Amino acid sequence: VFRAGREDVASRINSKKVVHGQVGIRCRFCAHLAHSDRASRSSSFPSSLSRIYQSLTMMLRDHFPKCTSMPDAEQTKFTMLKESKTTQGASGYKRYWLDSATKLGMVDTPQGIIITERSQAAGLSVPPFGTSNDVPAVASISLFGQQDPSTTLSPEQLENGSPFLLVDEEDRQLVSEYLYVLMSQVQRVFLTESERVGNRKTLEVGLPGIACRHCCRTNRKGLCRLFPARRRSLPSKIKDLHNHLRRCSLCPSDVKETLMKLKDESADNENLKTFFNSIWARLYSGKIIKP
């Protein structure tokens, strides 16, 4: 199990779209090689937990018999097991991989499977496969960050702890200094029931959003919290964010002055697209960026 890096995203630009931080599965024997040097289907990014079984079977069929990095002893064992007859049905296999993935903290999102610190913690409470026949394993955070019925975490509880920031030093080379500094002033938050008013009435409780990190320290709500429902609406929130920071009584004056000086800087459109794709992926992922 691994998270997609920049090389993984670039290698699939002409095929299935993968976002930075998305969770996939890969052959551990040839993972150290460049993508072009590996046998076919060396890795896969299932679109959901329920598709892991299918992805694995394709790797078993198309990759492992051809993997030149697999040790001879492992290859012999693999061939022997492949040719032996099993008695367990496919449904049992599917349930095993679903339970195992959930126990690792893997959860479904609109951008594919991710792992967060909270889902990993929740996965520790999932019983081992086969010990509970009544209740299937469930992910602690499902679509749009909502809580499954089996959990009791509220959006407020999800925000407790260290701030979940959305930019790191690597992003500095992609965008203007203005946008980098601006996005450094926000952290991830989750929509609460009390915020579902006006234009937010139709949004789901638990939807990830961005908020002024200075206001978050005092638990402020309101216009300092923005909830883009789609990736394409994320850039439009930038002006709203700057307007808030300009008026925010908690935002340091030196930050305001810096933003005003840098406001007219621009960046390459293609880099902007990459940057916002990364921000969107982090909203739904577990990559913690320390302040």
Image (spheres, helix red, strand yellow):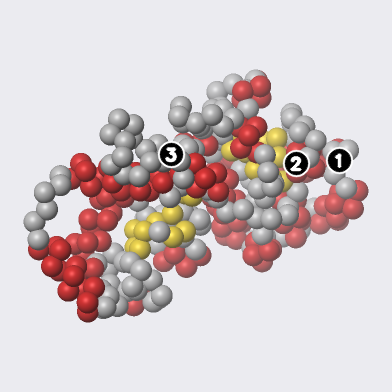
Q: Which residue is mark 2?
A: 212
Which label's residue is closer to the chain start, 2 or 3? 3
Determine the residue positioned at 47% across, 68% down. Answer: 7
Kind of residue sitting beneath label 3: Ala
Kindly indicate whether the residue at mark 1 contacts the one at mark 2 (C-beta within 8 angstroms).
yes
- Image quadrant assignment for residue 70: bottom left
Mark 3 lies on a secondary structure that is: loop
Instruction: Give the class, few, some or many, for how many residues have Cα within 10 Å of label 3's Cα (few <14, many ≥20).
Output: many
Determine the residue positioned at 62% across, 53% down. Answer: 288
Q: CA distance from mark 1 to mark 3?
A: 37 Å
User: Looking at the image, which residue sits at the far right?
Assistant: 253
Front-lying residue, 86 or 257: 86
Which label's residue is closer to the chain start, 2 or 1? 2
Which label's residue is closer to the chain start, 1 or 3? 3
Q: Which residue is mark 3?
A: 139
User: Residue 215, percent across and down?
Assistant: 79, 38
Quadrant where the C terminus lies? bottom right
Kind of residue sitting beneath label 2: Cys
Mark 1 lies on a secondary structure that is: loop
Q: Nearer the viewer, mark 1 or mark 3?
A: 3
288 displayed left or right of 146: right
Kindly indicate whether the residue at mark 3 contacts the one at mark 2 (C-beta within 8 angstroms).
no
Determine the residue positioned at 30% across, 78% down. Answer: 69
Q: Which residue is mark 1?
A: 250
Front-lying residue, 40 or 174: 40
User: Residue 125, percent across and down?
Assistant: 45, 41
Determine the residue positioned at 65% across, 48% down. Answer: 164
User: Residue 162, percent across and down?
Assistant: 69, 47
